[in-house]
Amino acid sequence: MERHANKNNAPETIKVPLQQLSKSGKTIFAYMRRSTSKIGQADSLIQQEDGIDSMVRKLGYENETIKYFAETHSGFENKKRKKWGEMIMEIDRWWKPCVIIARDISRLSRNPTDSQWIMDKLYWDNWNKKIIEKIYTLDFDNIKEWSSASDKEEVHKALSSSYYDSL
């Protein structure tokens, strides 16, 4: 298996041309983030990638084209999260329903700005087009699915708690 993250080098984004849709016709993004490059988090990206790979197999996406984004930055510093910015720009530019896979919801959002972007794209709020079809995260050994059919308050609470629990 090709690794997209490692503990020694700065993580790199694996670029897959957007015109290559997955077999299911969906664009699938995987996002991994660790807060720091300190020794205590050296294996964090590898563990996240292992969790994502497990979800990919369980969801039946193992033969799909998946764009991986990995970086080392605090979720509070959204302006410094270059890979996150690249991913959301691609999602906004693509304008077709996509799937996002992350180890847990806190990898995606630790600040109100990112939480609001996710809510807007998932529920088509504030005149934005709904372009996130589903978000998958791990909830212990189970896969948690978030979609526009999910209770909006539950999604908002999960995104908010990843911010407030880390303060």
Image (tube, helix red, strand yellow):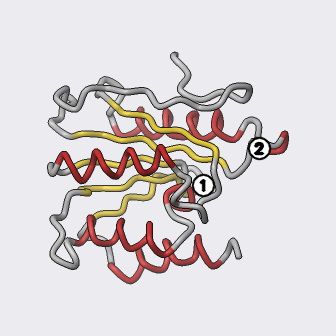
Residue 126 sits above or below residue 39 on the image: below
> Extreme bottom residue here?
153
Quadrant assignment, res 20: top left
Q: Residues within 10 Å of mark 2 (few under 14, many from 20)?
A: some
Classify 112 as above or below 142. below
Distance from label 2 to label 1 (Cα)?
19 Å
Expressed as whole percent of the image width and height from the top left, the position of residue 13 reads 47, 31
Residue that carries the numbered disc 2 in the rendered image: 41
* Residue that mark 1 sits on: 140
Give the percent coordinates (x, y) of residue 120.
28, 71
Quadrant of the image containing the C terminus: bottom right
Which amino acid lies under the numbered mark 1 shown in the image of this protein?
Phe
Tell me which label, 2 or 1, sits earlier in the chain.
Answer: 2
Residue 119 % position (x, y): 33, 71
How many labels were placed on the picture? Answer: 2
Residue 117: quadrant of the picture: bottom left
Judge depth for marks 2 and 1 and give the one in front.
2
Q: Residue at x 49, y 46 (%)?
A: 82
Quarter of the view holding residue 107: bottom right
